Image (tube, helix red, strand yellow):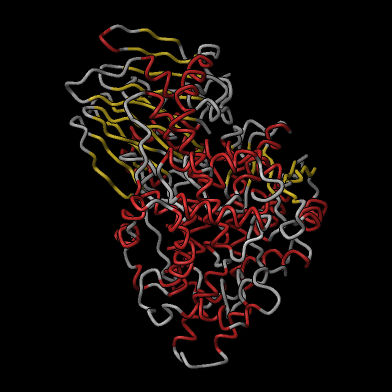
Amino acid sequence: MCGVAGVLAGSRAEPAGLDELKRMIAMLGHRGPDGYGFYRDDRIGLAHARLSIVGLAGGFQPIHNEDRTLWISFNGEIFNHVELRRELEARGHRFYTQTDTEVIVHAFEEYGPATWAKLNGQFAICLWDTTKRELWLVRDRLGILPLFYARRGDHLVFASEAKSLFGGGRVAPVFDPARLAQVFTHWSTAPHGSVFERVESVPAATAIRVDSTLALHVDRYWQPDFATDPSLAKLSLDEAADRLEEKLLDAIRLRLRADVPVGVYISGGLDSSVIAALARKLDTTHMHSFGVRFTDAGFDETPQQRLVAGHVGTEHHDILCSPQDIQAALPDVIRHGETPLVRTAPAPLFLLARLVRESGIRVVLSGEGADEWLAGYDIFKEDKVRRFWARQPNSKARPKLLGRVHPFAAVNGQKDSPLWQAFFKRGMMETDETFYAHRTRWRNTGWSQRLLSADVQATADDAAFEAHVAAHLPDGWSRWSPLARSQWAEIATFMTPYLLSAQGDRVAMANSIEVRYPFLDPAVDDLCAALPDRVKMLGLRDKLALRRLAARHLPAEIFQRPKRPYRAPMTTALFGDGAPDYVRDLLSPEALARYGLTDAAAVSALADKAHRQNGRMAGEREEMALVGTLTLQMLARYVHDELPQSIREQRAALDRTEIHVLEDLAGNARTATPQPTAA
């Protein structure tokens, strides 16, 4: 994968200068350490930073079609590029590279906007049509890869990360208080936005056409359908497992395509273990696997990871993550992620991606997506129990079923307590609410908003967040089963804006690592959506079809194991006797007053409590509030105090790196660096 950036000028505006493009793309050097490329004419400037995965010899971008009327700066992978290329060559298209990128420009020549739905991949596309003077900004179906844009005067700027927009100089890093408040309730902003004022995100499965007047024409080119396919309604569990295995094998086969070695993440859980087992079935050569261990036994899954690695036969590498490691990594995680976090979970994954890079691997497979598409999360069980309880709200027996949810949380009898039951009973009767399953989580996290300043709290509007998501729900959503509705809400509000970003793209690409997700393959997801609920969740037994598949390839200790959510130590790693200096510094009254984003008295009181108790807080919501506040302060320091120097340093570093493509047609003066042809 790579970094993309660019500036589109209005018809009467001056085009962006080459130095502006260099400042922008220099901020994305971590995404593309193998070299840079530029295209510029009297309307647009495109920039690209390359991480070489496919077509190593001749794949530097921007890339063009035969007559140079289409130019593309592309981040991602098109996994079915071999098949598409064969089809396009049969139709007379001539290629000059072996890359998947070039397939996109020829496909657009042939099919126009229908191209986007034909792509099996993870991608952010910036495509310039010189004939129509139109720019296309396109993201993959599930928003695996980021793409931001902002309109400033007569220019539209766009890039893989917001820091690139700031590097160009047209966009100032000003926080949007309402969106900051969203993070402190929903873990992320609404899927179309960012925490910065008037910096937007291209939504998943969306193509934005920017015309010659800079008007935006938004098209959603795909939406899911969770209505059960009648032909699958009577499918047995074994038959469902057969079909799932077939689709997963195809997805993994495509994702093993690369001109560099491909490794695999092994967490010790069911999903990554299935991917590892099936990948080894397809690739019997030497394969590397990677996992995170924890010094805190409450988070560690070392035995399961090593069991799986030994069973499937990978060369396994792992890191042992301590509180000090989380402390050291967190500032880098925030700088790369460009958002506050209410969890520390991305920090160990940042360190894991670094281990992958240091091991000489550039691409890894991950098991993300299985819990969303095959109903593995406890939130789906909560939803089922609460709906069952709501039918007899005075029952004493029905709420006891909540004791079977969250097997790794609330031990020592707490799950039988009136407090535990009251927590889930709130709003229980509102079963027609669009986000019935998710309101409990959001209310719990929303407690952390009390640490924000009065001005920020005044802008908080949970209804606006929900209204935005509801406005983009797929056709037919209201006719889906409650489980299916909850699954898509989880994908739209959590997986895409938080999981695939904070725990996926941002921490991986910070280390120039590409992560591929077989469970997010279009054919896999279409099958999972069409399967009857009973082969996903029956009673409170989850991911039944996947467990049946896993039983064919993995030890019982793995396929029978309850779902254990990936978590990392939070306040115990950051507060108390072992707290790093930056915690007290960033949460000092002076620092809190400097940025003005928090309630200094409330933060100080809770932080002092955390220090006294060595980070052992009474509840998770206090931990999330403190982590959110600390990382908000980190982000504020980065964008207000450190970013200008970073822009200068990264721009200077670009001058020491090779530029492979330079096509400068602005002002009718053409300067071209030839694109090397593929070997």
The location of residue 35, given as percent across then percent down, is 53, 19
At x 41%, y 45%, the residue is 597
571 shown above or below 427: above
Q: Nearer the viewer, residue 557 or 622?
A: 622
Q: Which corner quadrant holds the C terminus?
A: top right
Please indicate, yes or no, whether residue 89 appears anywhere in the rendered image.
no
Please indicate, yes or no, whether residue 33 appears anywhere in the rendered image.
yes
Q: Nearer the viewer, residue 429 or 82?
A: 429
The location of residue 132, given as percent across then percent down, is 22, 28
Q: Quadrant of residue 217?
A: top left
Q: Is residue 396 left or right of residue 69?
A: right
Q: Quadrant of residue 581?
A: top right
At x 59%, y 43%, the residue is 584
Q: Is residue 242 left or right of residue 75?
A: right
The location of residue 162, given as percent across then percent down, is 41, 35
The location of residue 186, given as percent across then percent down, is 44, 58
